[in-house]
Image (cartoon, rainbow, N blue to C red):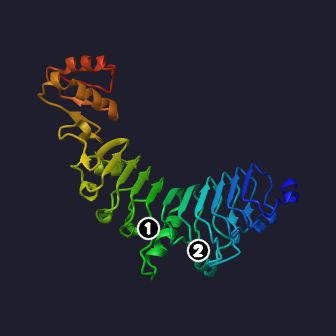
Amino acid sequence: MVLQNLRPNSNLKELKVYQYGGRSFPSWLSSLTNLVHILLVRCSSCKHLPAMDQICSLRKLEIGGLDDLEYIEIEGQGTSFFPSLKYLIIKYCPKLMGWQKKRDDSTAKLAQFTFLSQFICHNCPKLSWIPQFPSLNEALELNNVSLQLVQEIFTPSISSSSTVPPFSQLKTLMFSQLAVESLQPYGLQNLTSLEKLTIFDCRELKSLPQEMRSLTSLRKLHIYGCPILRRRCANKYCEDWPLVSHISYINVQARIIQLEGHYQLEDNESSNFVSCGEVTIVRFNFDSVVNEISNLLKALPPVVISHVLREANAVADSLAKEGLARNSDLVATL
């Protein structure tokens, strides 16, 4: 009731609301046409938001921690839909399903974020559709969202008759916690201006698409928490290395593989065993490489060293001095 009766001055430029307990926002929100920035945080009982797309000065909209939010109302379409919005950030809205209570395909086609530069969406697993943003050029982050939303964002644009490739000006792209096996359907070949690609915790992702070769502007590649992909990009001997070797900076599982275009690993470096579960070493002089073995074990999952001849006990003792205590993970069989 307090917020309903507040009625801020119509010249207000910035509105920040924290922990509002109402189920809906006051109608006056839509009438604050001079707002430049709206921030709504932890309004956990709110089920829907009023239309804000006619606030012609609004440049940044941030929504976070609205646990019960289900939809955001739409009032305008075409060029009148969020005519100045540049930054849209939606995080931790687990029940948010879309822009409108019930999807109207005719409205969906007409409503577009014409000038949006950055869209960040984290932990909104039920969000299935959002108006398109054809001019996105700064950043797109999709973290723990539905595959339906990912397809909604990419697929219609790919099939568009526009002469300008979709997302051709986009600079930064992040995929995180997506249950995808392939990025092939998402038209990476169109991202001709992409400079940074981050793939995080996509555990089912099996490989990189061939289109990676065509991303000549790509300067940074980060891969983390993707066990299958990790094995394919860990060094220059891996299967997907030809697809990424042109990238100046490559970081796989917090390890720099390539820096300023220069390969960082030596041919005999232990990173070749980055995904091994067992290492077999036979007839090898360990005295000169005990530090390498120590670093290997520190960096890898538990390993088993088997069939080590003569030097086995000496190796175990040396590794213990390096801070790796003898345990069942280190087995030396004479």
Secondary element under disc 1, as helix, strand or loop, is loop
Q: Residue at x 18, y 38 (%)?
A: 268
The quarter of the picture where residue 283 lies is: top left
User: Outermost residue, left direction?
Assistant: 283
Q: Residue at x 62, y 78 (%)?
A: 79
Mark 2 and mark 1 residues within 8 Å of each other at the beta carbon: no
Q: Quadrant of the N terminus?
A: bottom right
Dot 2 or dot 1, earlier in sequence? 2
In the foreground, 190 or 66: 190
Provide the residue designation for mark 1.
169
* Residue type for callout 2: Gln
In the foreground, 145 or 303: 145
Q: Position of residue 20 (x, y in %)?
A: 78, 51
The quarter of the picture where residue 215 lies is: bottom left
* Residue type for callout 1: Gln
Image height check: is 80 above or below 328?
below
Q: Position of residue 156 (x, y in %)?
A: 49, 75
Image height check: is 238 above or below 54?
above
Provide the residue designation for mark 2.
112
Q: Is residue 162 visible?
A: yes
Q: Position of residue 300 (x, y in %)?
A: 32, 35
Image height check: is 252 above or below 333?
below
Q: Position of residue 306 (x, y in %)?
A: 21, 29
The quarter of the picture where residue 24 lies is: bottom right
Q: Badge 2: few (under 14), some or many (20 or more) residues near its Cα, within 10 Å?
A: many
